């Protein structure tokens, strides 16, 4: 399962997250956080989903996502406790031993294909969202999953045993809105 935030990348510091995409390999759901505002029922439903110990959440830049929700949507508690997380940005660093990179640059490095960022830099605060924006949410989710599966394969090919521990035991989690990446394991990659 993926959880990600999309919005106008230039204005996220001002307005906060615009939408939350949640999906699987087969389906994508778009939660219009901006339009729904502070909605108790939505928070309860998202909390039920995120507390599900069977679900593994995959994202990119999870610590940043948590910070934005704390800053702009303090009433939402669904990110307070998440049991199982794979952060593709952190995973990339653990496999490749490279510095922090953007989603688009990691995708290009792994697949030698550029991601069209035109829609990413569109106005995600406008309503209704355009068909291109709605389509982009599904593409981003699929690309995120492709990154994770590719990194898993690279980690196995490089015989990174601890990467398999990261993927099998999902050592990252969130507690009290704090992203925790197990320090006992992270330095072994």
Image: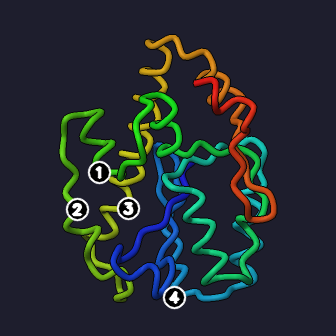
115 left or right of 126 in image: left
Q: Residue at x 35, y 86 (%)?
A: 128
Coordinates of residue 149 in the picture (x, y in percent): 45, 30
Q: Which residue is mark 3?
A: 137
Confirm or deny contact between disc 3 and disc 2 (CB under 8 A). Answer: no
Dividing the image into 4 quarters, which one contains the C terminus?
A: top right
Q: Which residue is mark 1?
A: 104
**CA neighbours of label 3 inside 10 A, class few (<14), some (14 to 19), many (20+):** many
Q: Which residue is mark 2?
A: 117
Closer mark to the observer between disc 1 and disc 3 = 1
Closer mark to the observer between disc 4 and disc 1 = 1
**CA neighbours of label 4 inside 10 A, class few (<14), some (14 to 19), many (20+):** some
Q: CA distance from mark 4 to mark 1?
A: 27 Å
Q: Using the image as rendered, state which of residue 33 and residue 165 is in the foreground.
A: 165
**In the rendered structure, which disc, 1 or 3, sits on the residue that comes first in sequence?**
1
Q: CA distance from mark 2 to mark 1?
A: 8 Å
**In the rendered structure, which disc, 2 or 1, sits on the residue that comes first in sequence?**
1
Closer mark to the observer between disc 4 and disc 2 = 2
Q: Residue at x 52, y 32 (%)?
A: 94
SS assignment at label 4 = helix
Q: CA distance from mark 4 to mark 2?
A: 24 Å
Coordinates of residue 137 in the picture (x, y in percent): 38, 61
65 left or right of 136 in image: right
Q: Residue at x 73, y 67 (%)?
A: 78
SS assignment at label 2 = loop
Q: Using the image as rendered, state which of residue 162 and residue 139 is in the foreground.
A: 162
**In the rendered structure, which disc, 4 or 1, sits on the residue that comes first in sequence?**
4
Q: Which residue is mark 4?
A: 35
Confirm or deny contact between disc 2 and disc 1 (CB under 8 A). Answer: yes
């Amino acid at each position: 399962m993926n959880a990600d935030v999309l919005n106008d990348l230039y204005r996220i510091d001002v307005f906060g997250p615009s939408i939350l995409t949640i999906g699987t390999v087969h389906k994508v759901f778009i939660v219009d956080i901006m339009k729904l505002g502070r909605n108790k029922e939505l928070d309860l439903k998202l909390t039920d989903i995120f507390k599900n110990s069977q679900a593994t959440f995959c994202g990119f830049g999870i610590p940043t996502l948590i910070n934005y929700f704390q800053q702009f949507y303090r009433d939402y508690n669904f990110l307070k406790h998440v049991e199982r997380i794979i952060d593709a940005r952190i995973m990339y660093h653990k496999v490749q031993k490279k510095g922090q990179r953007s989603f688009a640059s990691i995708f290009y490095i792994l697949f030698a294909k550029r991601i069209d960022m035109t829609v990413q830099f569109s106005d995600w605060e406008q309503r209704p969202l355009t068909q291109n924006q709605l389509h982009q949410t599904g593409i981003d989710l699929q690309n995120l999953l492709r990154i994770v599966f590719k990194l898993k394969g690279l980690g196995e090919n490089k015989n990174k045993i601890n990467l398999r521990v990261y993927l099998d035991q999902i050592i990252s989690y969130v507690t009290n809105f704090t992203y925790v990446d197990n320090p006992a394991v992270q330095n072994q990659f």
